[in-house]
Amino acid sequence: DIQMTQSPSSLSASVGDRVTITCRAGQDISTFLNWYQQKPGTAPQLLIYAASRLQSGVPSNFSGSGSGTDFTLTISSLQAEDFATYYCQQSYSTPPTFGQGTKLEIK
Amino acid sequence: QVHLVQSGAEVKKPGASVKVSCKTSGFTFSQYAVHWVRQAPGQSLEWMGWINGGNGNTRYSQKFQGRVTLTRDTSAGTAYMELSGLKSEDTAVYYCARSTFDIWGQGTLVTVSS
């Protein structure tokens, strides 16, 4: 199984801040990388697929980059509704595997 | 609109089985696969397996092989996940998701307690 490692595990930031979350794959996964946002008590929501493609309906302040083993999710200007937990997931091989999550909290 | 609607919360005793349903709408069920993913309290997401809505082929995580069974009713556009030999560690929210993980069900809490 491909291990996915996110950093940091938690992050405090303020509205308006620019935030970057990193995800590292245990082997080359090309751009088969998804990012999700999850709020308490709700299902994950797909934000970014294929490492950098914005899912329909997702605000443009979210962006993704990277290929191979190193990936980043950037939120250019944090909004109040962006405080949540974020997960990366590889879809390169079965089983699909998820990172441990990054909890983004209000400073 | 595309929706996945799951069955309600379950409480089971250790050793029992649970069957969760995932009713789809807004797309052609037979043209997609359905994944099952679970999330234990305070933990990350864990893939359990998927089923091809068209031909019914399945693929399971090694961790759950032998304990999980995925089935589907194409005419009803519904996928099912049955987990047997329940243990307290199986207490989690169980999600179904469409093949590209773009649409998720609302989740079903399964509690295993004596």
Image (spheres, rainbow, N blue to C red):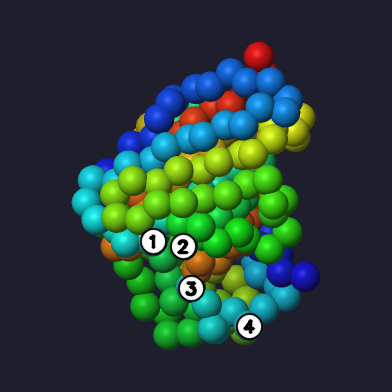
Tags 4 and 2 touching, CB below 8 Å: no
Residues at badges 4 and 1 in contact (C-beta under 8 Å)? Answer: no
Mark 2 belongs to chain: A
Residue B84, given in percent of the width and then of the height, sits at 37, 50
The answer as to whether the residues below labels 2 and 1 share one chain is yes
Q: CA distance from mark 3 to mark 2?
A: 18 Å
Q: Position of residue A24 (x, y in %)?
A: 32, 42
**What separation in Å lies between label 3 and label 1 (alpha carbons)?**
18 Å
Helix, strand or loop at mark 2: loop
Q: Nearer the viewer, residue B15 or A13?
A: A13
Front of the two marks 4 and 2: 2
Kind of residue at badge 2: Ala
Q: Kindly check if marks 2 and 1 are in contact, taking CB atoms under 8 A apart as contact.
A: yes
Mark 3 residue element = strand
Q: Which residue is mark 4?
A: B28
Q: Which residue is mark 1?
A: A32
Residue displayed at 43% across by 71% down? B51
Q: Given the image, what chain letter belongs to the residue carrying mark 1?
A: A
Look at mark 3 in the image and give the residue it sits on: B33
Q: Mark 1, residues whose alpha carbon is within 10 Å: few (<14), some, or many (≥20)?
A: some
Examine the rendered structure and indicate whether residue A59 appears above or below residue B27. Answer: above
Q: Earlier in the sequence, mark 2 or mark 1?
A: 1
For the residues beneath circles 3 and 1, the answer to whether they share a chain is: no
Q: Residues within 10 Å of mark 3 (few under 14, many from 20)?
A: many
Where is residue A100? Give x, y as percent.
Answer: 40, 34
**Do the residues at pointers 4 and 1 share their chain?**
no
Q: Please give left or right for residue B84 compared with residue B32 in the image.
A: left
Callout 3 touching callout 4 (CB < 8 Å): no
Q: Which residue is mark 2?
A: A50
Q: Amino acid at mark 4?
A: Thr
Compute the Cα span from label 2 to label 1: 5 Å
* Foreground tag (3 vs 2): 2
